[in-house]
Amino acid sequence: MFIDRARITIKAGDGGNGITSFIHYKGIVGGGPDGGDGGKGGDVIFVADKHLSSLVDYYYKTKYVAENGSPGEPKNCFGKKGKDLVLRVPLGTVIKDKETGNIIADMFTDGQKKVVLVGGDGGKGNAKFANSRRHAPHFSQTGEKTETKQVLLELKTIADVGLVGFPNVGKSTILSKLTAARPKIANYHFTTLSPNLGVCNYYDDQFIIADIPGLIEGASEGQGLGIEFLRHIERTRMLVHVVDVSGLEGRDPYDDYLKINAELKKYGELKKLKQIVVANKTDVYGADEKFVEFKKQIGRKHKIVPVSAITGEGLEVLRKTIFEMLSTLPPVKPLEFEEFNYEKPERLGWEILKEGETYVVVGSLVEVLKRNVVMDDMHSFAYLQKVLRDRGIIDELRKMGANEKSTIIIGGEEFEFVD
Ligand SMILES: Nc1nc2c(ncn2[C@@H]2O[C@H](COP(=O)(O)OP(=O)(O)OP(=O)(O)O)[C@@H](O)[C@H]2O)c(=O)[nH]1
Ligand SMILES: [Mg+2]
């Protein structure tokens, strides 16, 4: 199954908790704190891999969680770091934040790496909280918790040349003759159901050709399979527009040519691409006359190359014509976008919510305090008061009218306001 879009849930590992522990040897009483820090959680990293061609793995499995860091250990031992989670995606995969649609990365070159989510920091063990006044801290910090995110993966094939045309005109046959690709070929419409890529050699050079399902009138509005796949030729450098000049299907080549171009124009981006028109199936009886007329109708609008994909006639001219046009065009470029990165939650922000005489302090600072402070430890509580003072929270409470009768709630604990 060809899957070129997926929505997955990812989460970096949580940081491991720091622990509270004291040196404990036979015969030693009241040893100092020796609780180690927790390990950092694993990151979620995307890597572009040229050996992959679809996002099918992400269709079947949609939840990806990196390993958590391990808790710290006594004797000042650090907890183990959580393993990073590496997600491999085909070249051309665009990673977007589901919520905002912002682009996080365009996985354009083989081996390209992008750390999309960073693992949580490990919490500090109680050994880290000891100082000259606080010899035996009975508290340690819990590890940083990470958030779950949803990302969209969208494959936008990277190729130099896109093959377009009505169904059954011989696009896949041409690909199979110019490259080593072996797409399915058959005498009915919509044989090709997903893009095929092939590498075409031209002396020492190479270029990549993408064959997509046939387009029909209304493709740009969603008719047939078209719209799903036009995306795959959006970032090609030029198009090879294949037209059947045999008249085998009773259609008029020039009419087909106009219709396909009208669809490309409606799709937007594609109309800017240069194109070579290929008049295919010239081996069929009567095709010669049709070709002469078709060529007249096209005039000087586009270069036109007559070929028979079946007999191979004209294919070397086509190869050369494509190469010559490509050498005048700029290389395929990654998307231009403002890179979006998930921020770690702002660690020290706060806000005071007031309801009657109750003041609730919220924000990430509170989360950090909750992790750092053990309310019934005297030293720890003194630390809390100091932070509240230093961060201007006490001043702000006063400004908002807090007094002895007020209740202050911080991280679920109630306090009286003592100025
Ligand atoms: N006589 C003749 N038949 C051809 C030629 N090229 C392709 N065909 C035949 O046309 C039919 C369609 O060829 P495909 O290559 O599958 O066409 P396609 O454009 O990829 O078709 P879809 O994938 O359905 O859009 C097959 O039966 C081919 O053998 C040609 O040059 N001459
Ligand atoms: Mg085909």
Image (tube, grey):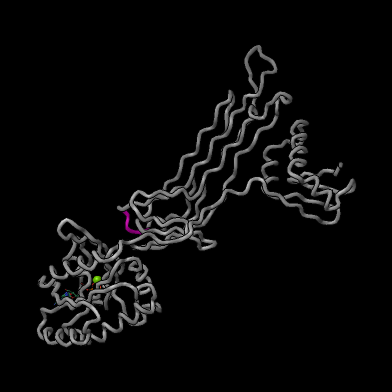
Q: Is residue 147 left or right of residue 212?
A: right
Is 4 magenta? The answer is no
Direction front: furthest residue? 328
Is 52 magenta? The answer is yes
Q: Is residue 217 left or right of residue 397?
A: left
Q: Main secondary structure of the magenta part?
A: loop
Q: Is residue 148 left or right of residue 206?
A: right
* Magenta stretch in the rendered image: 51-55
State the image quarter where residue 322 is shown: bottom left
Tell me what residue is drawn at x 44 percent, y 58 percent. Answer: 95
- Image x and y of residue 72, in percent: 57, 31
In this rendering, the answer to whether 379 lies above or below 368 is above
Which quadrant is home to the C terminus?
top right
- Image x and y of residue 243, in percent: 22, 79
Which quadrant is home to the N terminus?
bottom left
Direction right: furthest residue? 405
- Image x and y of residue 175, in percent: 20, 67
In this rendering, the answer to whether 351 lies above or below 76 is below
- Image x and y of residue 242, in percent: 23, 76
Tell me what residue is drawn at x 20 percent, y 80 percent. Answer: 244
View quadrant of ligand 2:
bottom left
- Would residue 225 be visible to someone looking at this image? no
